[in-house]
Image (spheres, helix red, strand yellow):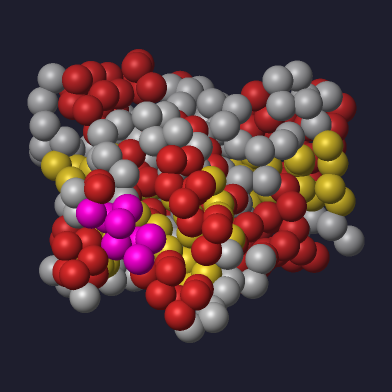
């Protein structure tokens, strides 16, 4: 039986955390909030517990997990070395939505890293996550707590919907504050490589390092998959998502015209995941709208993104229409997740509007 345990996000009850920590030490699975999304945790040093993560998610064994620790000085338990660049980034962004790829320590089972010589390490900025890691007394391997290939969970209910009975405990501290996953940076290569845009903006990384961080996101399209998070269709809703890209006014117009055609012309049940300013014009068409909030607030849009996708799925829409937003700051992560959800099938707005 899955136990859903409510905890205060700022001041979680130490007794509950101690119990959940014991579940982890005993080889159990505990889903917990981080500042980005909910994670599905197991003792990272216990291969049998780690195997349960892959089984619960339906995750292929070749997709490695992130190991969560509570402080920089614990990195020595899971990483064979912590390069100067890693220290510089953690000095600025730990705890926070940043994951570093480091050389792996022999104590970390091969199952965690999918046989790679490197390990992904993260220090989450959420009192519940930090308290749980400390209570467990072991590093915690945790992917996002969704079924493989589905949208990441930002609430305990999302975890329950996807994984249900496969999880022993779910610590419920309400919605997660960042809403998109951590930024992943490979610091074993020079210059460091951005493997996944996320909660820490690329601009901030480059500022902290005083040098470039290369985005290899395009490598996946060229056939070189470095992080399976880059698989073209990875953050996918369960209904098709059509993404409109291009100058903002054109993309808005193309989205609206398509919505009108599908909803009015063809009688389809249409969903739209759009900034607040687009919503009012779509609702009269009978479109189900997930409102991302003001476009000048990328952090707010990131927070609402995954829940919006799930709400539209739950509303039973046949297609979801979305458009990209400015790619500054966390906007890069939003654009990245939307492209993956669209399986990289994007509609250039000028053509769509003209057709
Ligand atoms: O915000 C987050 O990072 C959340 C929370 C729970 O911490 N976790 C998360 O984990 O998003 P997951 O498993 O959904 O995504 C981890 C990504 C995967 O794309 C995986 O391939 C990549 O990290 N990864 C893990 N270890 C790696 C390694 N050694 N080298 C390259 N990529 C790695
Ligand atoms: Mg994931």
Looking at this view, name the residue that lies furthest to the bottom.
Answer: 266
Res 128 quadrant in image? top right
Q: Residue at image x 28%, y 71%?
A: 345
Q: Main secondary structure of the magenta part?
A: helix
Q: Indicate whether 348 appears above or below 90.
A: below
What residue lies at 23% left-to-right and 69% top-to-bottom? 352
Name the side, left or right, on which 167 lies relative to 35.
right
Residue 53 seen in this snapshot: yes
- 313 above or below 84? below
Does the rendering let one see residue 57? Answer: no
Indicate left or right for 214 with 47 as reference.
Answer: left
Q: Is residue 280 found inside the magenta-colored segment of the image?
A: no
Quadrant holding the C terminus? bottom left
Residue extending farthest top: 91
**Viewer-closest of 243 and 12:** 243
Q: Nearer the viewer, residue 114 or 183?
A: 183
Q: Position of residue 340 (x, y in %)?
A: 35, 62
- In reply to whether residue 255 is colored magenta, the answer given is yes
Residue lying at 43% horizontally and 40% vertically, measured from the top left: 277
The N terminus appears in which quarter of the rendering?
A: bottom right
Q: Residue 162: where, in percent of width, then height?
A: 67, 64
Indicate the position of residue 204 as horizontal and vertical percent values: 26, 24
Residue at the image position 37 percent from the left and 46 percent from the top? 334
Which stretch is magenta?
250-257
Left or right placement of residue 289 versus residue 247 in this view: right
Give the total of numbered labels. Answer: 0
| Residue 89 image-quadrant placement | top left
Q: Residue 323 location, x and y as percent?
A: 34, 54
């Amino acid at each position: 039986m899955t136990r859903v345990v409510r905890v205060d996000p700022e001041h979680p009850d130490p007794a509950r955390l101690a119990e959940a920590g014991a579940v982890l030490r005993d080889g159990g699975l505990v889903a917990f909030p981080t500042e980005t999304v909910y994670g599905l945790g197991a003792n990272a040093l216990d291969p049998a517990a780690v195997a349960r993560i892959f089984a619960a998610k339906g995750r292929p064994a070749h997709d490695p997990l992130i190991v969560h620790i509570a402080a920089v000085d614990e990195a020595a338990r899971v990483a064979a070395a912590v390069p100067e660049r890693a220290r510089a980034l953690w000095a600025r962004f730990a705890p926070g939505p940043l994951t570093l790829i480091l050389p792996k320590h022999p104590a970390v089972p091969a199952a965690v890293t999918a046989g790679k010589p490197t390990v992904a390490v993260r220090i989450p900025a959420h009192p519940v996550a930090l308290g749980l890691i400390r209570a467990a007394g072991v590093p915690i391997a945790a992917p996002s707590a969704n079924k493989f290939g589905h949208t990441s969970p930002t609430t305990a209910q999302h975890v329950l919907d996807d994984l249900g009975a496969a999880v022993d405990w779910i610590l419920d501290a309400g919605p997660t504050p960042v809403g998109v996953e951590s930024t992943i940076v490979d610091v074993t290569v020079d210059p460091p490589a951005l493997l996944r845009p996320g909660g820490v903006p690329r601009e901030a990384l480059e500022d902290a390092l005083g040098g470039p961080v290369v985005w290899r996101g395009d490598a996946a399209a060229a056939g070189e998959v470095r992080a399976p998070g880059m698989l073209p269709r990875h953050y996918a809703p369960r209904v098709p998502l059509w993404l409109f890209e291009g100058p903002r006014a054109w993309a808005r117009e193309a989205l609206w015209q398509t919505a009108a055609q599908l909803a009015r012309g063809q009688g389809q049940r249409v969903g739209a995941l759009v900034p607040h300013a687009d919503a009012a014009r779509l609702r009269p068409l009978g479109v189900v709208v997930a409102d991302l909030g003001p476009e000048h607030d990328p952090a707010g849009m990131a927070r609402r993104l995954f829940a919006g996708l799930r709400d539209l799925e739950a509303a039973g829409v046949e297609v979801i229409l979305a458009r990209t937003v400015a790619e500054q700051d966390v906007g890069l992560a939003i654009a990245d997740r939307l492209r993956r959800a669209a399986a990289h099938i994007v509609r250039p707005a000028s053509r769509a509007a003209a057709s």
